[in-house]
Image (spheres, rainbow, N blue to C red):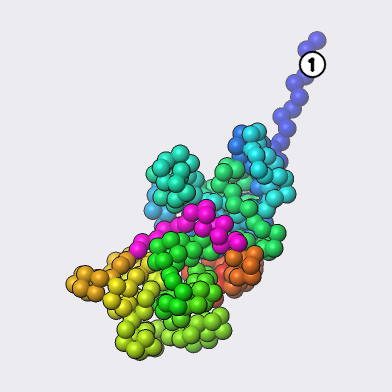
Amino acid sequence: MNELAAPPVSARLMRALRLHGDRDLRLEDVAEPPPPAPGEVRLRMHAIALNHIDVWGWRGMAFAQRKLPICVGVEAVGEIVALGDGVEGWMIGDRVAPYGAQTCGVCPACRDGRDNLCENVSGVMGFHLDGFAREYVNQKARLMVRVPDAVGTEDAACAAVTFSTVEHMLFDNARLQPGEVILIQAAGSGIGTVAIKQAKALGCTVVATAGDDEKCEKAKELGADHVVNYSEKNFASVARRVTDKRGVDVVFEHVGATTWAGSLLSLRMGGRLVTCGSTSGVSAETNLMMIFQRQLRIFGSFGASMRNVADGLAKMAGGMTPVLDRVIPLDRFADGLDRLESRRVFGKIVVTI
């Protein structure tokens, strides 16, 4: 007599926040991932930090083909709960900031530590590929950055995109120097608040812009030397006035069309503008004669390297923490995106899992 076959074991379920269509987020029970493959770790996710890339994905602006539904969440912090074969240098219980860009690890840029210039990147988790807004994630061990013990979990959630973006913009690209004057646009944003702290720590003079008086006052409390409500005053005129008509050394730009011309006008001869965003529009007229006559330098800055992530976490461990606008639970993720989209935020919104 043949033995009866054992019934299939039901897959264990976990919570995941998935996007089914434009602005259609659903908190669902989905199957946990399989055991981590060789070279992978399994993470228990703890928190997500919201960014404009999350807003773009929520609004259907993925810039590349993706398959829905997709799990959201681009910037996160988690804890290792399982190790795949061959993983060395990590232990269960280690806290990590996962690097969301799925890089190849073998192209010249990857080998040189310029991860954000990977020639064969397969996508960004939470935007093109399933992201971190779920209880468990399998991730390549080589794409982990260790979180120092001194860094709180909610702060660490802001490392992989926010702090690292500012590190890459200010130091790899603009090469900000002690004592320089910098104009920081949209100072109430997540990267704007970090940029103020980074520049002041270097001994720079900061001119910060924001869209209302309340944000200007908060920027001043963070250390900005001069603040401009750009909805009421011409920030380029202020930048020139506070520098005795010379102009600023560096402009930290990520707003786009509405501030572009003024940002260029704010620069001194030979000044540097670094940009990582275009939230107000992707196209802007540019006075090319001004660019070459004044010998201005413009740097495009996208993402960051894993080294930038580690450098940002080291600064957090030294006391330079991110500004948190609020901390909310996973089921209010869409509320956080709405707040970010409507610019009612000062600093970062962190979502706990």
Which one is in front, 255 or 253?
A: 253
Say whether residue 151 is left or right of residue 170.
right
Residue 153, magenta (yes or no): no
Residue 252 drawn at (x, y percent): 41, 71
Q: Quadrant of residue 314?
A: bottom right
Toward the top, the furthest residue is: 1
Residue corresponding to mark 1: 3
Magenta highlight range: 299-314
Say whether residue 90 is left or right of residue 49.
right
For label 1, the crowd category at 10 Å Cα-Cα, with few meaning under 14, some 14 to 19 and many 20 or more, is few
Residue in view at x 56 percent, y 62 percent: 312
Any part of residue 315 in sight:
yes
Instruction: Give, as a three-letter code, the residue at label 1.
Output: Glu
> In which quadrant of the rendered image does the N terminus lie?
top right
> In which quadrant of the rendered image does the C terminus lie?
bottom right
Q: Quadrant of residue 7?
A: top right
Residue 94 drawn at (x, y percent): 70, 50
Residue in view at x 32 percent, y 66 percent: 298
Toward the left, the furthest residue is: 289
Q: Quadrant of residue 290?
A: bottom left
Which one is in front, 178 or 249?
A: 178
Say whether residue 344 is left or right of residue 244.
right
Any part of residue 161 in sight:
no
Compared with 289, 7 (above or below) is above
Residue 215 drawn at (x, y percent): 51, 82
Numbered marks: total? 1
At numbered mark 1, what does the secondary structure look like: helix, strand or loop?
Answer: loop
Residue 116 drawn at (x, y percent): 44, 52
Residue in view at x 36 percent, y 79 percent: 248
Which one is in front, 114 or 98?
A: 114
Residue in view at x 50 percent, y 82 percent: 224
Residue 307, magenta (yes or no): yes
